[in-house]
Amino acid sequence: MQDEVKSGLVVPAADQAPLRHGVPHALQAMQAIVLRELMKFARQYGRLVSALVRPVLWLAVFAAGFRNVFGVAIVAPYDTYIPYDVYIAPGLVGMVLLFNGMQSSLAMVYDREMGLMRLLLTAPLPRPWILLSKLTATAVLSLLQAAAFVIVAALLGTTLPLLGAHTPTVLLAAVASALMLGALGLMLSVHIKQLENFAGTMNFVIFPMYFLSTALYPLWKLEESGAQWVYLVARLNPFTHAVEWMRFAMYGKDPGIAPWVVLGTLVACFAIACWGYDPQRGFGALTKRGGGT
């Protein structure tokens, strides 16, 4: 049997058969990657607990302590005064999506160093499709964790208008936000060469994105308090638009430019990630250096 050289790698003829199957083979590959991530997540019992601890603490402790201190005025998308826990609930859902999206970049660095991602990236499939499959798996896990948090929040007495006529728009906003934050993590994984650099990178990404957004306080409150630079940064923060899209979708109101910012950031981050994982650049250069060591 003859071998064929593709992208500098020798691919046995027996392994070239999937190339002829087209879309069915590509979908099967995506299904395999997603199922692998789900099975790995199912074995990591502490991962779900750790993902829920942060938002539940904010909801059960922080929101309870400031319930009657922070007044949320009657502004869109609300038609009446609301308690503080109801306001921050969409932001806490965004927190779950944000942390899991960033954690996916750690998983990419680990898989790349241990060799599994290297094997996936040499599969007879377009590299962007493999990255899209990885991104899809990340988004699915993020949404499952967000759903678990919503259930816990309901048990704690925080009710959100998730079921009803607006459910499709809420799901669309949540899916797009999960994909955007996952794509951001995927893009960061291109530049994180070793696991030791992950903690520092995350501190400069997660916390600024979360605290410089509308997850905990409305934009008008920032402007009213005189924190002009915080207000401006929060308006430019794509995480702000992800939270606002979900918040407005819950009440069936127009989210403005939020969907376009989220979708634009998703496309840009994913395109940069694909460029970085090109064999001649990010991952290929890393392979030439012997795995970044």
Image: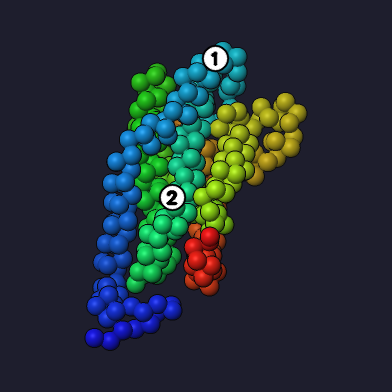
Where is residue 176 drawn, in percent x and y?
45, 48
Q: Is residue 264 left or right of residue 34?
A: right
Q: Residue at x 35, y 21 (%)?
A: 155
Q: Please tell me whether residue 248 is drawn above or below residue 221 in the rendered image.
A: below
Whether residue 50 is visible to the viewer of this picture, yes or no, is yes
Secondary structure of residue under mark 2: helix
**212 vs 278, nearest the viewer:** 278
**246 vs 205, nearest the viewer:** 205
Q: Residue at x 30, y 62 (%)?
A: 29
State the quadrant of the N terminus: bottom left
Q: Which residue is mark 2?
A: 107
Snapshot quadrant of residue 219: top right
Q: Residue at x 38, y 31 (%)?
A: 49
Whether residue 262 is visible to the viewer of this picture, yes or no, is no
Q: Which residue is mark 1?
A: 65
Q: Please tell me whether residue 142 is drawn above or below residue 123 in the rendered image.
A: above
Q: Amino acid at mark 2?
A: Ala
Numbered badge on residue 155:
none
Where is residue 175 drawn, in percent x and y?
41, 46
Q: Please tell me whether residue 270 is drawn above or below residue 54 in the rendered image.
A: below
Q: Residue at x 28, y 86 (%)?
A: 2
Q: How is the image coloured?
A: rainbow
Q: Earlier in the sequence, mark 1 or mark 2?
A: 1
Determine crowd level at label 2: few under 14, some 14-19, many 20+ residues with C-alpha closer than 10 A: some
Number of the front mark, 1 or 2: 2
Secondary structure of residue under mark 1: helix
Spatial CA span between label 1 and label 2: 36 Å
Check the image and name the residue furthest to the top: 68
Is the C-beta separation of discs 1 and 2 under 8 Å? no
Where is residue 255 drawn, in percent x and y?
53, 40
